[in-house]
Amino acid sequence: MSTLMIVAAVVMGLVLGWCLTLTVALAAMSRSQARMQRKVRYWQAEAGRAQAAGQGGNEQLTDAALKQLVAPDKW
């Protein structure tokens, strides 16, 4: 009887460990995907600003390029 309980506990521990690992991995992938989406939106906006600045003159383009060299704080 005790052998059966030990086997059941081990199986239950393996299943719970697998579920916990899966949950942590899915959360990490979700955070990574959200971070990448923020970066894509940021650089798309920067490209739009650079294009607008390119139509406005070289001085504005230079300022926009210098601002791109500094990474945003929220990455």
Image (spheres, rainbow, N blue to C red):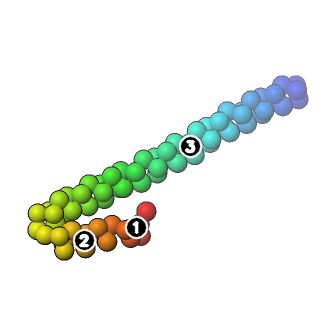
Residue sitting at x 57%, y 46%: 24
Mark 2 or mark 1, earlier in chain: 2
Q: Is residue 17 above or below residue 47?
A: above
Mark 3 or mark 2, earlier in chain: 3
- How far is the residue under mark 2 from the one under mark 1? 16 Å
Return the residue at label 3: 25
Q: Is residue 75 above or below residue 59?
A: above
Mark 1 or mark 3, earlier in chain: 3
Question: Which quadrant, please, contains the N terminus?
Answer: top right
Which circle marks residue 62 in the picture?
A: 2
Disc 3 marks which amino acid?
Answer: Ala
Do residues under tags 1 and 3 come within 8 Å of each other at their CB atoms? no
Which circle marks residue 40 in the picture?
A: none
Relative horizontal placement of residue 36, taking residue 3 as reference (left or right): left
Residue mark closest to the camera, 2 vs 1: 2
Across and down, in percent, residue 59 comes to 19, 74
**Which type of secondary structure does the marked residue at label 2 adopt?**
helix
**Which type of secondary structure does the marked residue at label 3 adopt?**
helix
In front here: 58 or 70?
Answer: 58
Across and down, in percent, residue 52 comes to 14, 62
Which circle marks residue 71 in the picture?
A: 1
Residue mark closest to the camera, 1 vs 3: 1
Across and down, in percent, residue 29 comes to 49, 45
Disc 2 marks which amino acid?
Answer: Thr
Query: Outermost residue, right direction?
Result: 2
Residue sitting at x 13%, y 69%: 57
- How far is the residue under mark 3 from the one under mark 2? 42 Å
Disc 1 marks which amino acid?
Answer: Ala
**Which type of secondary structure does the marked residue at label 1 adopt?**
loop
In front here: 21 or 71?
Answer: 71
